[in-house]
């Protein structure tokens, strides 16, 4: 466990700090409804993304760059939602859930790392579709080595951009230990600190621009190019396949929209209930929707599912 020892007010520097996670504890009925919806979303997300991973791994026809990216996205969504949702569900059953500063920072760093990986991965997926539709040398440019290199670069860049700054951030608290959130979210924790974090706040704005605005702008540009290529296609079947393949990726609007509204807008010293719900939208809703969008839009995935059922029937 990662433990941080801080000098907080008049407390002894060797004393570990604990926080209370407020969540929706002030609204008991709403918290019960929230628990049921969150549990259902968590189960659906695990089953849906696990099914996608199973189909891609078991069907050789899906061993292509696009489905390599999709398998990474499904794996990432499972990791992302598992990093916080089980603990949130447990906290809903406790009157005053507490978490130590060490656990809080570890959870925050893990969620930020996975979130940034997803931001960058969605841009890579848009680039893959852009190259596939408009470049005859697609199989060469997006070969296995390139796919593995891109994946490794994403994880490394996300770690350097999020985990390293978080673990080096000097945090000092002055008597406020109630986090107005479901988990240790970065903005919620920063509202409690009385440390001088101007440098880290500027770094956070720069990182948000690099990992949110830049990938989002790149995705918009990629789909603009794809749209031009589709309009020039003479085959209606080709246009339909290209549109259906790219249309499934447009769920990124929900992810980027909610994330940008949280991290790229002026921040108040307190978080509202709206902010908590918005953060749950990109943290829970998007991973849950991804399997449905990809499986409903994509004929290859539905074909792989039918072949998998056929194998199970034959055996």
Image (cartoon, grey):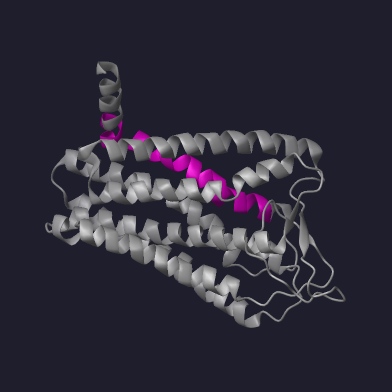
Classify 194 as above or below 61. Answer: below
Residue 230 position within the rendered picture, expressed as x and y whole percent measured from the top left: 22, 50
Type of secondary structure dominating the magenta stretch: helix
Quarter occupied by residue 32: top right
Quarter occupied by residue 30: top right
Nearer to me, 289 or 6: 6
Q: Quadrant of the N terminus?
A: bottom right
Residue 163 position within the rendered picture, expressed as x and y whole percent measured from the top left: 53, 68
User: What residue is drawn where x is 27% and y is 34%?
Assistant: 299
Question: What range of the chain is rendered magenta?
Answer: 275-303
Nearer to me, 29 or 238: 29
Residue 206 position within the rendered picture, expressed as x and y whole percent measured from the top left: 51, 76
Count the numbered circles shown: 0
User: What residue is drawn where x is 52% and y is 69%?
Assistant: 162
User: What residue is drawn where x is 54% and y is 51%?
Assistant: 282
Residue 292 visible from this viewpoint: no
Classify 11 as above or below 188. Answer: below
Residue 97 visible from this viewpoint: yes
Q: Is 77 displayed left or right of 103 in the figure?
A: left
Q: Is residue 147 magenta?
A: no
User: What residue is drawn where x is 67% and y is 68%?
Assistant: 267
Q: Is residue 289 magenta?
A: yes
Q: Is 17 displayed left or right of 57 in the figure?
A: right
């Amino acid at each position: 466990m990662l433990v941080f020892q801080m000098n907080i007010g008049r407390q002894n520097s060797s004393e570990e700090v604990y926080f209370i996670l407020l969540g929706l504890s002030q609204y008991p009925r709403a918290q019960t409804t929230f628990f049921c919806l969150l549990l259902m979303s968590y189960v659906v997300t695990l089953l849906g993304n696990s099914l996608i991973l199973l189909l891609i791994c078991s069907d050789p026809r899906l061993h292509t760059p696009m489905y390599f990216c999709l398998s990474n996205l499904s794996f990432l969504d499972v990791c992302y939602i598992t990093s916080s949702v089980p603990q949130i569900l447990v906290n809903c059953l406790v009157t005053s859930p507490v978490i130590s500063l060490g656990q809080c920072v570890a959870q925050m760093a893990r969620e930020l790392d996975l979130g940034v990986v997803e931001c960058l991965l969605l841009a890579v997926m848009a680039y893959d579709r852009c190259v596939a539709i408009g470049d005859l040398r697609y199989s060469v440019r997006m070969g296995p080595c390139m796919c593995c290199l891109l994946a490794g670069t994403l994880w490394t860049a996300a770690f350097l951009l999020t985990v390293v700054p978080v673990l080096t951030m000097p945090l000092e608290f002055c008597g406020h230990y109630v986090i107005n959130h479901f988990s240790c979210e970065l903005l919620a924790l920063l509202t409690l600190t009385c440390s001088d974090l101007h440098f880290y706040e500027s770094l956070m704005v720069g990182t948000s621009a690099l990992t949110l605005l830049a990938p989002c702008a790149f995705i918009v540009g990629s789909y603009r190019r794809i749209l031009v290529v589709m309009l020039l296609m003479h085959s209606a079947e080709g246009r339909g396949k290209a549109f259906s393949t790219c249309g499934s990726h447009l769920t990124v609007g929900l992810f980027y929209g909610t994330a940008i509204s949280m991290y790229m807008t002026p921040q108040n010293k307190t978080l509202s209930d709206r902010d908590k719900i918005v953060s749950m939208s990109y943290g829970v809703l998007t991973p849950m929707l991804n399997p449905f969008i990809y499986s409903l839009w994509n004929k290859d995935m539905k074909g792989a599912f039918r072949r998998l059922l056929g194998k199970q029937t034959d055996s």
